[in-house]
Image: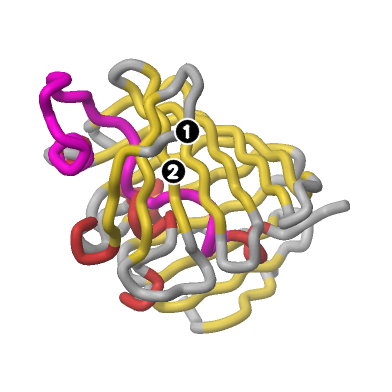
Amino acid sequence: MRIGITRYWRSFVVAAWLVSGFTPATTTAADLVSEWFSGLESIQADFTQQVFDSAGEQMQDSQGEVWIQRPGRFRWDYRSPYRQLIVSDGKRLWTYDEDLEQATVKDLDATLSSTPAMLLSGYRPLEEIMTWEKDTKTGPLNWYRLRPRAADASVEQVRIGFAGRQLDTIEVVDGFGNHTRIHFSAMQRNRKLDDDLFQLQLPEGTDIIGRDQ
């Protein structure tokens, strides 16, 4: 069953956080997360994304590449199983479905800043949006739990897992129990990104829903 990106974009990827280094073992969890964001300017990575419903049934399995330029700009390029794009130029948010030849556009809104995509892009300072603590989840990764300060059905809880000094996985649970898991690989931090990545060039004849370009 095909599920459009727009259905899940509000709970899909913690928009602002990937990759940073760990501090010494004596550092508190709060200091660690703060340092993780400190100095972050851009990210480029491959990703895989899985979405499960509240019953644990897998609803989506996709792969692609992401670019993030803080503050507020990002490009999530879903390449399989369907080609879809989610692009922000810092002012507007575009979603484009290549097969349907359809795009939607809306203004970025500060009320959406607790969603993963907004967080990754540094749309607002993390401490204004989230609280965080060390997670008790066990396994090969080191986990931290983040919770929105304001009630928001789109994001109830976020976990981030580090493998050594590298961000590896983000898990998001929304208020309806849906679970999104994103795994990153080949991540590059603070490399110079082309501004054109954050401008969506639509083919002629694309059906645009929402604000005009």
Of badges 2 and 1, nearer the viewer stands: 1
Residue visible at 12% across and 29% down?
27
Which residue occupies 73% across, 55% down? 53
Q: Nearer the viewer, residue 191 or 150?
A: 150
Q: Nearer the viewer, residue 140 or 44?
A: 140
Amino acid at pointer 2: Arg
**Element under disc 2:** strand
* For the residues bearing labels 2 and 1, Cβ distance under 8 angstroms: yes
Q: In the figure, 125 relative to 144: above or below?
A: below
* Residue type beneath disc 1: Lys
Query: Where is residue 117 drawn, in percent x and y?
Result: 42, 56
Residue at image location 62% in from the left, 75% down from the top: 208
Q: In the drawing, does residue 29 fall left or right of residue 159?
A: left
Q: Is residue 69 magenta?
A: no
Colour scheme shown: secondary structure
Magenta: main secondary structure equals loop
Q: Residue furthest bottom?
A: 211
Q: Earlier in the sequence, mark 2 or mark 1?
A: 1
Characterize the local packing of mark 1: few (<14), some (14-19) or many (20 or more) Cα atoms within 10 angstroms: few
Q: Which residue is mark 2?
A: 159
Q: Which residues are magenta?
A: 9-34
Q: Is residue 10 left or right of residue 79?
A: left
Q: Is residue 153 left or right of residue 101?
A: left
User: Which residue position holds label 1?
Assistant: 137
